[in-house]
Image (cartoon, coloured by chain):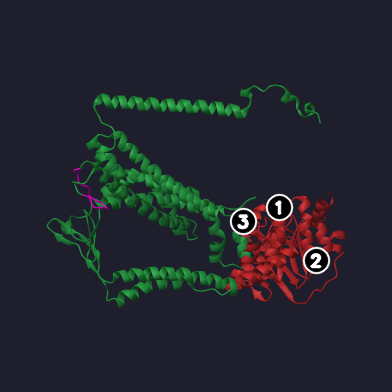
Amino acid sequence: MSSDANKSPSASQKTRFWHDPAKRAILFQSLLVIAVLGFVGMIVQNTLHNLESRGITTGFAFLSQEAGFGIIQSLIDYSESSSYGRTFFVGLLNTLLVSVLGIIAATLLGFIMGIARLSNNWLISKVASAYVEIFRNIPLLIQIFFWYFAVLRALPSPRQSLEPIENIFINVRGLYMPEPIYGDGFGWVVAAFFIAVVAVFFISRWSKKRQDETGQRFPMLWTAAGLIIGLPLLVYWVMGSPLTWEAPVLKGFNFRGGMTIIPELAALWVALTIYTAAFIAEIVRSGIEAVSHGQTEAASALGLNRGKVLRLVVVPQAVRVIIPPLTSQYLNLIKNSSLATAIGYPDLVSVFAGTTLNQTGQAIEVIFMTMLVYLTLSLLVSAFMNWFNTRMALVER
Amino acid sequence: MSMTHQVEDKLMVEMRGVNKWYGQFHVLKDVNLEVKKGERIVICGPSGSGKSTTIRCINRLEEHQKGDIIVDGTTLNNDLKNIETIRREVGMVFQHFNLFPHLTVLENCALAPIWVRKTPREEAEEIAMKYLRRVKIEEQALKYPGQLSGGQQQRVAIARSLCMNPQVMLFDEPTSALDPEMIKEVLDVMVELAEEGMTMLCVTHEMGFAKTVADRVIFMDKGQIIEENEPHEFFNNPQSERTKAFLSQILNH
């Protein structure tokens, strides 16, 4: 074959490079990268110049200086003589605490409300609808103010504390509970708990295998509950109850001892939970409704009862629809927790991007670190949820 | 021409004076139907005539408000035990297949034997493979429904029902959602099933199928059974005007 015959008519003409989409894309992308780099360089240059002319030193040296202010809630040792660097971790842990508590509670409440909205019971479904419509449509900040100022600020002073259960006190300063003091041998109780969990894991594998082989089913739920609760209780009793409680005691104007949940945490947690759960309820409802009724019919027609239809057919399909929007609700909740600063809950924004920034004036470093934290948290949560989602994804063609 | 086969005297499905309303709308009006073991019934009629509703009442996908339905000696009432007993004995094939998209073809078929009949998994999968072979689709066993054509999906749906070893099979317009070239592969499977003596109730517009397979053809209109007869008489000598009008519309194409 001659080489001329292989050439298509257009190939013999020279293509101008801006008519070639691939080359054109490279050109435009290069131009964009140059423009972005130039812009960033200009901003950095400008900022450094401004900082220098005002006499502000840049860098992260301030992190090791003494903070000199107190924080009302800390999960790690912290005092006024701790460093600014430590205020970062105190704030970060407080943010994580309220986020994790919020995600767990909002997921539970959201699933309950979402399923309740689909209930055939008129009252239940209407209550769930009203809940969703009310809490979804009021700004979160107002809800935080409501729980903090209208509900928790209205509680009595420490001397008139409410005591709904013995040794648990509720007053305007917070919720005071007895703190567990672990005696000798409590480690065995913890060990018994973990042994029970491992045992349940193996028994459930065994029961699945037995079902595969013989078709017999094993009352797994009751066995698991019995083991996980029963075994630690038994060990606890055998070891002679190695756990005592230190009750909070009213001394002077406030309680001493025990564990405390400060009203700022309670208000923020409740508000974040109730607000986010309203959105999750809608996501769950739409996820279940997205599974076509034909699936339920086909499964029922095969003789599966209502519970098994849900468990084996509807829920596995609904979960796939639910996960992606659920992820963005989790991300929203984490980011919304920064509204803590409005009521003085010592989260990352309030402590680090608030007090620490004001005292040090290191705005760029502090804001940069704070943004990096939220970015990292959000990306971690997304990565985990995406991984979970791909595991559950439907196989199409 | 009907095929020769064994029809026993035992009644498999009995509907006596069945009535159903959707709100004010009277969908089924005094439907009486008796289906003997081994009998093949085709139900036809214009859309909205209540033919699908009739067979969907037999396994309680729809609830009837008046009259009695007795399936293989079990009376259909609000007792969940009775409903489950009947559903175990009655297989159903839907217009839109309704395979479970999150399970493989094999898992679709083995699901009910495992969870309803408590069959060991290995045995359930053997049963599933047996019926998948029968509908000539065993090589697709490990694929997901989304990877199959419509005709293949419908054959899997038939196999899935057969895995429960049902006494009666209900077909609710099984070929209506299929491309023309896939209708035959599904009808072939249904004819084969009929030849093996399965008791069948088919709602379908496939009049060729009715002529070759049915023992009786039932014509419904506006929630009532207007006419029923053996296929030769039904098609060549229809009695009621409405049947004649319906037949002239669907046969003249």
Magenta segment: A67-78
Q: Are marks 2 and 1 in contact (CB under 8 Å)?
A: no
Q: Quadrant of the N terminus of chain B?
A: bottom right
The chain identifier of the residue carrying mark 3 reads B
Above or below A175: residue A212: below
Q: CA distance from mark 2 to mark 1?
A: 31 Å
The image quadrant that residue B191 belongs to is: bottom right
Can you tell which of label 2 and label 1 is closer to the viewer?
1
Q: Are marks 1 and 3 in contact (CB under 8 Å)?
A: no
Above or below B161: residue A56: above
- The chain painted green is A
Q: Which residue is mark 1?
A: B149
**Residue A68 lies within the magenta run:** yes
Residue A113 image point, x, y percent: 44, 56
Q: CA distance from mark 2 to mark 3?
A: 36 Å
Q: Secondary structure at mark 3?
A: loop
Q: Which residue is mark 2?
A: B216
In terms of sequence position, does the residue under pointer 2 or pointer 3 come before the other?
3
Q: Which residue is mark 3?
A: B101
Q: Residues within 10 Å of mark 1 (few under 14, many from 20)?
A: few
